[in-house]
Amino acid sequence: MDALPRVTIVTPSYNQAAYLEQTICSVLDQGYENLEYFVVDGGSTDGSQAIIGKYASRIDWWVSETDLGQAEAINKGFTRATGDYIAWINSDDLYQPGAILSAVKTLEDHPRACMAFGDVLSIDAEGHPFNLMTYGDWTLKDLMCFNIIGQPGVFMRRSDQLKAGLLDLSYRFLLDHHLWLRIAQYGEMVYVPQTWASARIHAKAKNVALARGFGQEAYQLAAWMPYQPGLADLYKKNRRRIWAGANRMNGRYLLDGGEPWKALRAYIRSFIQFPPIALSEWRRIGYAAVSLFFNVEKLKLQYLERRKNTLFDTTDDSEDDGTIEK
């Protein structure tokens, strides 16, 4: 590529001073020359503005003001974007070196692609990796069945994002998946088996502190699909798979939220609707069942420590099924 296409990256943030600078540097240190970068802060009170100001000369636009949450902050950046390609990286996540260039090359090589996505490494609060989330050559149907793509590993063609529209402010947890469902109606999704980003899993992250909210929005999305012209036919053909996926997702996050009995009930509903989808998480189902009778927290911590040690040695060769293990 002689002339690099323009890429717009948006970072929404609110009181994430502990991680914000690392996120900003992971974007600016990509070395991608035709980069447009916005940071949208929600009026933080923890010194975030000083961190942003430190890099203001390299940031194309930033603001710190009260907003209605993550979706509105990202939308502020999207409406200002001029890039050919667009993405957002949350203020506790990181891009891997070369991620932007790799994503751009992928989208340039696939002119019918509306979005490209790569693998995402799970890291803890200190930045230590403990899981690699890998995906596959997924289609719109896979998204409808709640195969979840790690958001920081996604890059979109802006012309297709404009067709799909902005993030829906009524979604707090699956706002990204809702957008993927809309944008995937306009083109192909291209998976690249490379690690493009790191997602930080920590105590204040939504998928830890508010885990049960994800399952409820999965049900909301499943109920929304049959009324969308671009999804209605696929929904009719795959209704049982879709609801099995929604229940599986609810079970996953209920288990993460420390509610194994409710998680098991969700998994049972998933199994009744479409057994292969439920059984794709048989390890979690077993863990939930054992949790009803025994304190397995120590075993979980031992497993995570082994997993972390393995990743330190063989991160590039590790594989997983896309499930976030916590």
Image: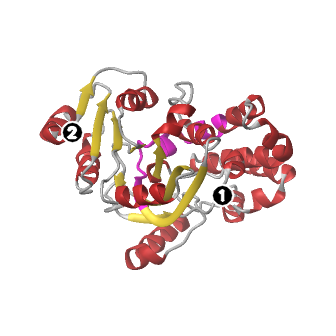
From this view, report whether residue 107 is shown above or below residue 311.
above
Q: What residue span does the magenta drawing correspond to?
A: 196-217
Asked if 271 appears above or below 262 in the picture, the reply is below
Q: Does the magenta stretch include residue 168?
A: no
Q: Residue 264: x percent and y percent? A: 74, 51
Identify whether 111 is placed above or below 236: below
Closer to the camera in the image, 16 or 243: 243
Check disc 2 and report its element: helix, strand or loop: loop
**Residue depicted at 24% across the width and 52% down the height:** 33
Dot 2 and dot 1 residues touching (CB under 8 Å): no
The tag on residue 59 is: 2
> Considering the image in quadrants, where does the N terminus appear?
bottom left
Residue kind at label 2, given as amino acid type: Ile
Q: Mark 1 points at which residue?
A: 291
Q: Nearer the viewer, mark 2 or mark 1?
A: 2
In the picture, residue 287 is in which quadrant?
bottom right
The percent position of residue 8, horizontal first and vertical second, equals 35, 41
Query: Crowding near pointer 2: few (<14 within 10 Å), some, many (20+)?
Result: some
